[in-house]
Structure formats: structure tokens, C-alpha cells
Image (spheres, rainbow, N blue to C red):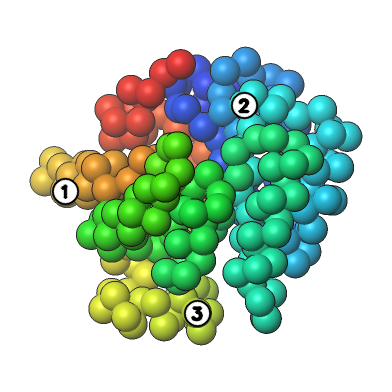
Amino acid sequence: MRELAPRLEAAGFHTLWVNDTPAGDALASIAVAAEVTATLQLATGVIPIDRRPPLEIAASIDRLGLPLDRLTIGIGSGRVAKGALAVVGEAVAVLRDEIGVPVVVGALGPKMRELAAREADGVVLNWLTPDAAAEAAADAQAASLARPRPAHVVQYVRTIVDPAAREALVAEARRYEAVPAYAANFERLGVTALETTLDASAVTGASESDAGSLLDEYLGAVDEVVIRAITAEQTIDDYAQFIDHPLLADRLQLDIP
């Protein structure tokens, strides 16, 4: 993080999104990124509130001294089995009261998306085609009409830029297809998980053009596209190659602060 965050900022990327996992603390990673950058926006995508309750998240943000003017907190219901909508809505309210930064919600189903649009600052979408993302974005905008500002719609797109990462991308897609909620969503949409990803690893002009067109469709469908970097070995060199890929530079370095 200490080495890659400045490279992202120098390349012109607008926001660094960091996942929170049992083995990796997103807020601690963001604290490191904040130390070595000045303008790069920082976001979590997303923290499961069944594992890290909102008051704990707020306390960690305060303890780490994260820059509130650059911070967005993304949360998700995680494995909350009952009353997920109410639990997430309460978490949004607590985080707003405690830290006063934008709060967005990772949402798979239409009810959670509506709640995110109505009560949070935005919605984080995942594993959708451009058409499905555009439809979800329109629904979010409609649900937030009564608010001063429309909901901010973010779309995660799993992406590779190196042919060696193809196996990792396929494994990631299969892992999510094994999750019942995602499997049901893929079935409803009539697509496979792999069909919602972006392969920018092709070296031929035609294939590279196709990848660029698909990325442009995503950029036109939502307010913010998060390129979820899938690499072969997850080394600094792998991520550096990803950051410098011309397909991304042509489109995602336009949003320079």
C-alpha cells in the first residue's frame, strides 16, 4: 500500500477502494495510503457490519486519524440473517452521527439498493453487466428523488490486464457463483459471473477495442467505476503493470483533482 498508493495518485486515479476481509483491515490500509498521498480519495468497499459494528468502525477511524475530507465508508450487511435492511439502515445513521463522512452501501438485491439510495449516500453494485448496472442506477436515482442530492452509484468491475491473470479471474467468478445469493442473481439476469468482468489482457487491436468499448459502457451506466484489479500473483510488480495499462489510462485518468 505504501508503494502503490502514490503511484495511483500520480497516474491520476480518483479513488482507492480497499476491501475489508478477515485477514485484511481496510481502515489500517487506508491509514497507510493517507500518509503517502495528498489528494487521492479513500474508500472502503465494503466493511461487513456483522463482523465490524458501526461504533467499532467509527472508533477505528478516530484512532487511526483518517482524513475525513478524503474518506468514504462503504458497508454491507455481511451475514446478517434477519432484519438486514433495518440493521444496515441503523448502521448508516450511526456512522453519519459519529464521523460525518459519506456512507455507501453494498447492495445485491433491489430492497437493499432502495434503502442505500434512500438513506445512505450511495450504493455499491457488484457483478453486473452494463445494462443491469444502468437499470440499477436508474432505480437508485428514482428512490433518492426526495433527497437534496441523488444517490451516488458505484460499480465494481473485476478486471485483468495480463493473460496470466485469467485463471485467477475464472476462479474468482466461480467462487461467487457458488454463493447462493449471487447465484440467484446471475440466474435472474441470465448471465454468468465471467460475463460481468473485463478482460483487457488481449494484445490484438480488435480485442483491445472491444474491452475499451465495454469499459465505456460501464462508465456511461453509473457515476463511478471501481476497477477491481485481479492479478496473477498479487505482487507489487503485478499491480504496477495494472496501474500503467493504457486502456485504463485513456479513460480513468481523466478525473484528476
| Residue at position x 69%, y 20% in the image | 36
> 18 or 74: which is nearer to us?
74
Distance from the alpha carbon under mark 1 to that under mark 3: 30 Å
Which residue was labeled with disc 1? 210
Distance from the alpha carbon under mark 2 to that under mark 3: 32 Å
Q: In which quarter of the view is residue 18 placed?
A: top right
Give the number of the mark in front: 1 or 2: 2
| Residue at position x 51%, y 66% in the image | 112
Q: In which quarter of the view is residue 6 placed?
A: top right
Decide if residue 151 is on the left or right side of residue 22.
left
| Residue at position x 75%, y 29% in the image | 66
**Placement of 37 over or under 206, stated as above or below:** above
Which amino acid type corresponds to the residue marked 3 in the rendered image?
Answer: Ala
Q: Which comes sooner in the sequence, label 1 or label 3? A: 3
How far across and how far down the image is residue 192, in percent?
32, 74
Which amino acid type corresponds to the residue marked 1 in the rendered image?
Answer: Asp
Distance from the alpha carbon under mark 1 to that under mark 2: 34 Å
How far across and how far down the image is residue 145, in percent?
37, 48
User: Which mark is drawn over residue 181?
Assistant: 3
Which quadrant would the N terminus be assigned to in this image?
top right
Residue 201 seen in the figure: no
Decide if residue 167 is on the left or right side of residue 234.
left
How far across and how far down the image is residue 123, in percent?
48, 52
